[in-house]
Amino acid sequence: MELPSESEKHTATLTTTNSANNLTNTKFKSTHRSPLKQYKRWILILATVIFFILWISPTNFLKWLHLYNRDPKIVIILAANVGGGVLRWKSEQEWAIERLSIQNKREYAVRHGYGLTIKEMPIDKRYSHEYRESWQKVDILKQTMREFPNTEWFWWLDEETLIMEPTYSLEDHIFKRIDTIVNRTLDGFNPLEMNVDSAYVDYTTPLDMLITQDCGGFNLGSMLVRNSEWTKLLLDIWWDPVAYEQKHMLWEHREQDALESLYANEPWIREKIGFLPLRSINSFPPGACNEFSDDPRYFYKDHDFVVNMAGCNFGRDCWGEIQLYQSIYEEKNRRWYSKLFGM
Ligand SMILES: *[C@@H]1O[C@H](CO)[C@@H](O)[C@H](O)[C@H]1NC(C)=O
């Protein structure tokens, strides 16, 4: 009998091993999942998670996390749907302004972990027999303070505003510098020539309200209000129906004039109100206060925090103005990759 050659022996052995392997494989398959299948499951889960995050986009992801920040220390109150309601339909451009403005505040609030609440300001008869148009600001502040009892500061912003420097936090830009940038009296800047002195005013108490003045007096388009007993009292008195009844025809600038009057006559109100430079939170476009066009205190310059198209709906082009500043904003805040790739 002829013995198998070395190579044949080898092949034979190999075959045996292979079939043995196949056997174990088959056995393995019948009792466990194959490793590939197991991986498949994880790959699928991972892909789904990645897809989900990309789909909701990083900003939205942060926003989603932010929903769980139930007690923001700072809440931005944004007026929306201003003038919408019973009198007329809003135009396409007005809707576009609103969308742009909301998006702008939303991105800012998400970045800094602030709350954002959007408040409708339509013109309708909500207050017994009156519209109290734009006075609603006072009522809305009151409601919002009830809604966020643990918030320390509220930042009111009119609809036609844009935050131009989203990296500035209110802490760094305002609150930490409060002693150096805020004036507690009208000494330095007094466009209405109000009485500068008042008896019984304590200028050492902490400030509860930070506003600005423009060429025409108090401007409340962008202001900071602390959540305090003082503020609640102020809002009640400010909203007082008797004063409204007597004066609303005379107070051309409505709730702003009312606050000026309270400031002028009530020392306890005066001592808690501080004046920020207009351009720290409320820069103007050239169209506003245009009779003072050479006064650098009013008008937006590069690196100003916020621009407010104040009064643009009185014969100016709100949409044109906001688009102009939006394009400046986009140019300034383009990401490095879009600069690189022109995206
Ligand atoms: C604060 O006062 C200074 C002068 O005392 C003045 O130059 C400045 O414009 C004032 N600023 C504000 C916001 O009132």
Image (tube, rainbow, N blue to C red):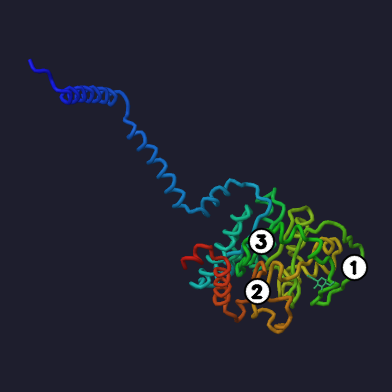
Q: In this image, 63 relative to 206: left or right?
A: left
Q: Label 2 is placed on what type of residue?
A: Ala
Q: Which mark is residue 198?
A: 1
Name the outermost residue toward the top.
1
Q: Measuring 69% from the left and 57% from the top, which residue is drawn there?
A: 154
Image-quadrant location for residue 242: bottom right
Q: Measuring 40% from the left and 45% from the top, which residue is drawn there?
A: 47
Q: x, y percentage for residue 192?
A: 80, 77
Q: CA distance from mark 2 to mark 3?
A: 22 Å
Mark 2 vs mark 3: in front: 3
Decide which of tag 1 and tag 3 comes sooner along the chain: 3
Q: x, y percentage for residue 7?
A: 17, 26
- Judging depth in this view, the residue of 194 and 122 nearest the camera is 194
Number of marks in picture:
3
Of helix, strand and loop, which one carries label 3?
loop
Mark 2 vs mark 1: in front: 2
Above or below 220: residue 23 = above
Q: Residues within 10 Å of mark 2 (few under 14, many from 20)?
A: many
- Residue under circle 3? 168
- Residue under circle 2? 310
Tags 2 and 3 in contact by the CB under 8 Å rule?
no
Above or below 6: residue 297 = below
Of helix, strand and loop, which one carries label 1?
loop
Q: Residues within 10 Å of mark 1 (few under 14, many from 20)?
A: some
Indicate the quadrant of ligand 1 in the picture: bottom right
Q: In this image, 132 relative to 24: left or right?
A: right
Quarter holding the N terminus is: top left
